[in-house]
Every structure is written in structure tokens, then in C-alpha cells.
Image (cartoon, rainbow, N blue to C red):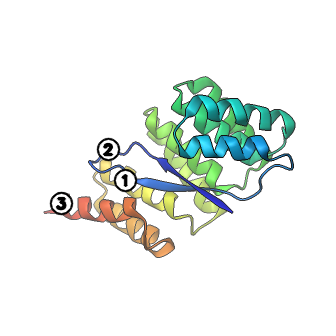
Amino acid sequence: RFALKTCSQMRCAPCAFADANVTAPPVNNADFDLGSDALKAKDWDRAVQHLAIAAKAEPANADVQNLLGYAYRNQRKYDLAFVHYKEALRLNPEDAAVHFALGDFYETRGRLDLAQKEYDAALVADPNFGPAHSALGWLALGRQHMQAAYEAFNRALKANDQDPRAYHGIAEYYSQKG
């Protein structure tokens, strides 16, 4: 099992990270591995190059589609990112990480209503998916729904007591609450 740390482009000072877990590498995984390594190095062009080959070799692999969407998103090729995120969901509609990635995509595009729906869907798929709890906390905080934010951050910390995004959210909650 491999965990890729992804910058979530938060609205607060320190960059926070959310886990995007990939659990099933494709059968022909050389390009998947090279693409994953390129993602870790934030070499988006190389990631797209290798993950596109992996996607052609394994078109039914939702993990490849999800990571390819993430790479395209970081290249600012949003239409291609969206296509691959939606394909990943078509292939595996119960994947919390894919719902989270699509929610994060919508959030960075300013579509907070759609982001919330995807974060909620991630939690339907996996009620303990901490990154979705953190993301919902930040959405609630932005809407000044203080109690909902506090509860979401605490659920995130219950799922992962090392979640920096949730800790920062709790600090921001107290800062705003006064």
C-alpha cells in the first residue's frame, strides 16, 4: 500500500496534506510506479507521461485514473483531470479517495456545493476517511458554521491523530471563535 501526500491548496498559511491512498497497482506496474514517483517529486509532465501509459495498459484501474486526474490537475489541464476523476469513480464508485480527490478538485475550482457532496460521498464509502472530515471542517469554517467545523476536525483527528490539516483547522477554529 502506497500513500501519496498531496497539497490541498488550503486557504491558510502552512501547506496541509491529505492522504490519497492507492491500494491496487496495475498488473503492469512499471509505468504506474514511475508515474507515482514523479507525482511524489511533483514532476507533473513525467507523471502524466507514465500514468497515461499505465492507463492504456490498465484502462479499468481506478487508481491509475485517479492519479492521472491528479497529475493533469496539477498541470492545470482541468478538463482532462475531470475526465479521469469521473472515470475513476465510474470504475470504483465506492472509493473514498476518489470521491475526496474529486471534492478537492471542485473546491479548488470554487464549486463548494459539489465539493461538499463529494466529501460526503467519501464518508459514505468510508466513514473513517479523515481527509474528508478535515475538508468538511474547512468548508464549515469558511461558512462560519463553527460547531460543524469543530466536530468535523475532531472526527478527522479521531481517524488520524497525525492529520496536520485537522490540527490547523482546530487552531483556526479557536482563532476565529476568540
Q: Crowding at label 1, few (<14), some or many (≥20) Cα neighbours within 10 Å?
A: many
Q: Horizontal and vertical percent for residue 83?
A: 68, 30
**Quarter holding residue 96:** bottom right
Which quarter shows the C terminus? bottom left
**Amino acid type, mark 3:** Ser
- Tell me the residue that label 2 is attached to: 11
Q: Is any atom of residue 89 visible in this view?
A: no
**Amino acid type, mark 1:** Trp
Lower position in the chain sequence, tag 3 or tag 1: 1
**Amino acid type, mark 2:** Arg
Q: Crowding at label 2, few (<14), some or many (≥20) Cα neighbours within 10 Å?
A: few
Asked which secondary structure carries label 1, the reply is: helix
Q: Is any atom of residue 12 visible in this view?
A: yes
- Tell me the residue that label 3 is attached to: 175
Label 3 and label 1: CA atoms lie apart by: 13 Å
- Tell me the residue that label 1 is attached to: 138
